[in-house]
Amino acid sequence: MLSIKRCKPLLGTYVSVQLRADFGEDRLMGLSDRAFSKMATLEKRMSFHDPQSELSYLNREAANRCCEISDDMAAVLGSAMLLSRLTAGRYDLSIAPELVKNGLLPQIHTVIAGRGSWQDICLEKNKLHFKRPLLLDLGGIAKGYAVDQAFLSIQDEVDDVVINAGGDLRMKCWQGKTVAIKTHHQAANSTVDVLMKSAAVATTAAYYFGPGHSAIIDPETREMLLSEQSVSVYAQSCVIADALTKVVLLADNVKQILQSMCASAVIVGDDGAIRSL
């Protein structure tokens, strides 16, 4: 049985692909190339930073007319809208203007005045229209989707596969495995080991961007959430796990939401204490 592990800069982070199978290295390398290629294609399509991406096109045009969108974009937006409805808007893709204002996204688009929301997004199969000008950032949910699609493209051809994209991780043989989760502890690079509870896990924390900064925005107040906790969500897919990490930090009925999505979560405090949901 042969194993390989490769790492490349992708999806705004470093992505590792680890494969194990009972055949030669050349074939394993080819399968890992396929996974990386899939993620690179989806990154280009859903990037906020790239003015030529499909997402940038939609941010420019969807308020003016009904736009045709790709199957991948429809899948990501469909998952996002499902979560927005389920969480009564505590998950909302339209908070990109606040991320631009806070310096966490580049100002390559016209910053939207006023306050739109997910309810201004009209999605019907492969057609998208905004009721008013919006600025969407797919961020983590697109990263989770890319990991899922790369995983699905090769999982049936290997004995085991692990894809890790900066906190979004999916495993084939996950039972009994543990993952290391960073904590906001005084000790540098402090982590705690937690048991995998499903095939995918995503971790986020408000403190990743340093003191006084956070990529987690409360859609109701449009203010940054500042917290020293980290949240890890276990689900059947990374696209759901990643989106739910923000929900755990923002929503009130967290347990009900997690149960409805067949997910669970752990919250790690700054002292390393673990609380399960």
Image: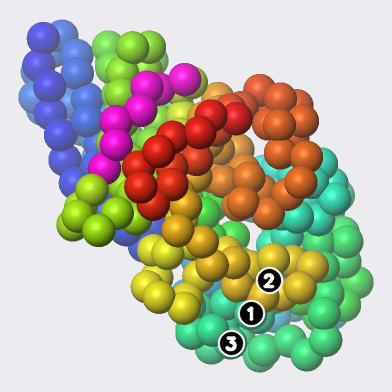
Q: Is residue 12 rendered magenta in the image?
A: no
Viewer-proximal residue, 157 or 83? 83
Labels 1 & 2 near each other (Cβ < 8 A): yes
Q: Does any portion of residue 144 appear in the rendered image?
A: no
Reading the image, the residue beneath label 2 is 95
Q: Is residue 195 rendered magenta in the image?
A: yes
Report the amino acid beneath label 2.
Ile
Report the amino acid beneath label 3.
Lys
Labels 1 & 3 near each other (Cβ < 8 A): yes
* Magenta span: chief secondary structure: strand
Is 81 located above or below residue 137 in the figure? above
Report the amino acid beneath label 1.
Glu
Rounded to the nearest whole Å, what is the CA distance between mark 1 and mark 2?
Answer: 6 Å
Q: How crowded is mark 3: few (under 14 residues within 10 Å), some or many (20 or more)?
A: few
Rounded to the nearest whole Å, what is the CA distance between mark 3 and mark 2?
Answer: 10 Å
Q: Residue at the spot x=63%, y=45% of the render?
A: 248
Query: Residue 101 — which label?
Result: 3
* Residue 22 location (% of width, % of height): 15, 9
The answer to which quarter of the image holds residue 257 is top right
Q: Does any portion of residue 142 appear in the rendered image?
A: yes
Is 131 located above or below residue 89 in the figure? below
Reading the image, the residue beneath label 1 is 98
Tag 1, which secondary structure?
Answer: helix
Q: Residue at the spot x=29%, y=31% of the render?
A: 193
